[in-house]
Image (cartoon, helix red, strand yellow):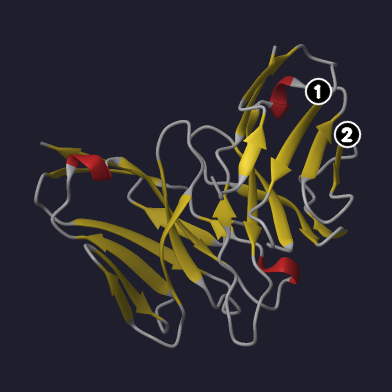
Amino acid sequence: DTGVSQNPRHKITKRGQNVTFRCDPISEHNRLYWYRQTLGQGPEFLTYFQNEAQLEKSRLLSDRFSAERPKGSFSTLEIQRTEQGDSAMYLCASSPRLGRGSYNEQFFGPGTRLTVL
Amino acid sequence: QQQVKQSPQSLIVQKGGISIINCAYENTAFDYFPWYQQFPGKGPALLIAIRPDVSEKKEGRFTISFNKSAKQFSLHIMDSQPGDSATYFCAASSRETSGSRLTFGEGTQLTVNP
């Protein structure tokens, strides 16, 4: 399978615990994105990496959230001291290096469903 | 501020009919408009996309119509099938924004009855 993969697919945790999610982008895609999707809503942007550099973070990304992409390949998203409001689907997307005049096609993974009890 | 507004919220169509979903945007810097299809428990899948230099793009049964002056675009699904039942999201992005992040609409839940 050459698509974007995410693990775990489901995570149930108790309030106050830390959780970490992993995303493996499509091979050779240098851009990686994290989005959050709550029930009945469209995905909302959280953060963006170009290679290993985190270039943009949304105001939705509180200081309890941290994301890394240490070698410019896979990425992790950690949520510390989880709250019930963190319950959502966390989606990862990747896109290839943009050529001149090209547009940013983003390909999504299956997501990690987080439930905070 | 909701920059991409999508309607209707839900849509029921008979098999063989035409499904039409509309989106309107505010940011004139947007220059890429994709549509995504999402099944329950799955991530969004890129369906079709359009750039503002064309007014229509067709791929199989799916057509995007784009009206730059009205800042609106729509998805038409011809000969709708029960397998098309899913949630559809319009989105928009701008190359002026770092990373060209996507801004999504609220989604339309499409049901195609057999």
Residue A86: name its quadrant.
Answer: top right
- What residue is shown at x 67% (from left), y 57% (from top)? A27
Image vertical order of residue B37 relative to residue B98, above or below? above
Residue bearing the label numbered 2:
A64
Q: Identify residue type, mark 1.
A: Thr
From the viewer's perspective, is B51 left or right of B87?
right
Image vertical order of residue B78 relative to residue A20, above or below? below
Q: Identify residue type, mark 2.
A: Arg
Contact flag, marks 1 and 2 (Cβ < 8 Å) = yes
State how many labels appear. 2
Badge 1: how crowded within 10 Å, few (<14), some, or many (20+)? many
- What residue is shown at x 37% (from left), y 70% (from top)? B73
Distance, label 1 to label 2, CA atoms, is 8 Å
Query: Where residue A82 is drawn, which disc sits there?
Result: 1
Question: Mark 2: which secondary structure?
Answer: loop
In the picture, which quadrant includes the N terminus of chain B? bottom right
Residue A25, position as x, y percentages in the image: 67, 51
Of A83 and B60, nearer the camera is: B60
Image vertical order of residue A53 relative to residue B11, above or below? below
Chain of the residue on which disc 1 is drawn: A
Image vertical order of residue A97 relative to residue B37, above or below? below
Residue B79, position as x, y percentages in the image: 13, 55
The reply to the same-chain question for discs 1 and 2 is: yes
From the viewer's perspective, is B92 left or right of A72?
left
